[in-house]
Amino acid sequence: MDEAQLKSELQKYFGYPAFKEGQLDPILSVLAGKHTLATLPTGTGKSLIYQLSGYLLDGMVVIVSPLLSLMEDQVAQLKFMGEKRTASLNSMLQFEERQKLLSSLDQIKFLFLSPEMLQNQFVMNQLKQIPLALFVVDEAHCISQWGLDFRSDYLFLGAARQALGNPLTLALTATATSAVMGDIIGSLHIDGNALNVFEGPVDRANIYYKVAAMPPEEKNEHLLELLKRYPSPGIVYFSSKAQADAVAFMIRKKTSLRVEAYHADRTNEDRITIQHQFLQDELDLICATSAFGMGINKANIRYVIHYHMPNSLEEYVQEIGRAGRDGQQSTAVLLYSETDYNFKVKMLQGDFPSDFTIESAIKNKAVNPDYGSPTEQTLLQHILRQQLTKEEAKQFIAARRELKQNLLKRMKGFAETDNCRRAYISAYFGKSSLVKPSHCCDNCGIEEPPLVGTIIFGNAFPTKAVPHWEKIVSDLFLL
DNA sequence: CGTCAACTCCCTAAGGAGTTGACGGTGCGTTAGT
């Protein structure tokens, strides 16, 4: 199929007159029967790639997705477009619903599920009965980011693929270094000769980069100064749930900004409500941990501030990439402190099993569930599955530790460089050419660009807060 | 890493000095049944 024919199919199925940048080539590749890995910035219509390809191929499209909320969003979107042959197979289904779905898979065109679900033998047996058009791995960087120490089922996607007869495969992600792409291809057991890779742009020209170095105790003050100048909405990222809560509380007390904290300790209901309010512009900013963001498609986010740096530049780029999807000028600020870096280095040490733990796990052929963090246990289970010797296991752990430390060092390098930060990111992702926008970064000696929008800070709702009775009583008795 | 809260000790008791320990984040599916 050529480009002109594809365009008319696009018109027919979706009513769009033209493809967005980066969509066409992966679709042509898939339709030519090639396994395909494509990196495209979020918000540029990644899902259309498997949707249109799926329509033009016979059989069911299976989409592996990391989050229940993403599956539900995608199903809702397809149903909204009139595609009823869509379902999500996950733990939210009642047994009867699940049974009904699994016994009528031949009625389904797009099936969403988690990597964990593909470990279920009954599910796999049902899937094997159905001809597959395409096996899609959405947010494929999760394989590399989570597979070894967090959600090990990501490592078994390759085995699941093979059990399903090596179906045509499409892996999609926003950004990936060559190392991450290597992890993805390797874990999926894809034959490199039958693979096409398409890399989209990494740079986001409308985001201005800035790093402000300061000791931790000055961050609150500095953050308030920024919020005084920046129009809503925005995101502030933290690497601790407690600090996200504390700073959200502080902002609520000192400004009239509408703010909520978002992290894994919030209830599901709260998380859904907060996300919804944010999307509806009913919140000005969210104080979040890394739990917030995947699948968030909000166009008008004006700033992303990092109260703490993340563990890698990949994560940083993903998180700041949520700003300025509408193309308007936006700003990314990192509040950098070497204390934070040292703390993360220390934490990284505790993330890995000691030699003693490795040896006893291998000796007992089992992981002691009472000892070590969940991530350590996941790593040990991997060691046992791979049947590594003690020496191999120690080398594996040492290499893993070094890799994580290097990721962190490159993040630190970004914060501390005196050269162009945009160029640093570009080089990190292996891009050779870079066109610098007029508002590049603080190191390019360029003033921070003005942002368009309404500044709320302290003047929108001048309310004198009435303290809760418990607070009055507590103050009275100096509790 | 370096800070800070909680604890112990002193012993007349109170509160000050010294010591110790804590200190990060991401989510599936799970339960019986096909």
Image: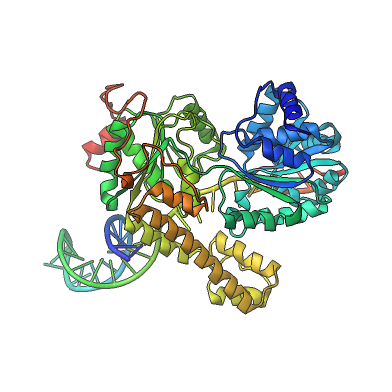
Residue that appears at 23% across and 37% down:
A475
Residue A361 against residue A193 in the figure, above or below: below
Residue that appears at 55% across and 69% down:
A399
Q: Position of residue A296 (x, y in %)?
A: 54, 35
Q: Is residue A198 visible?
A: yes
Q: Is residue A87 visible?
A: no
Residue that appears at 71% across and 43% down:
A136
- Please indicate whether residue A85 sits to the left or right of residue A220 in the image: right
Q: Nearer the viewer, residue A237 or A472?
A: A237
| Quadrant showing the N terminus of chain A | top right
- Please indicate whether residue A145 sits to the left or right of residue B12 in the image: right
Q: Nearer the viewer, residue A405 or A253?
A: A405
Total residue callouts: 0
Q: Position of residue A160 (x, y in %)?
A: 77, 53
Residue A462 against residue A418 in the figure, above or below: above
| Quadrant showing the C terminus of chain A | top left
Image quadrant of residue B15? bottom left
- Please indicate whether residue A313 sits to the left or right of residue A18 in the image: left
Q: How is the image coloured?
A: rainbow
Q: Position of residue A7 (x, y in %)?
A: 71, 26
Q: Nearer the viewer, residue B15 or A424?
A: A424
Q: Nearer the viewer, residue A259 or A314?
A: A314
Q: Position of residue A217 (x, y in %)?
A: 26, 50
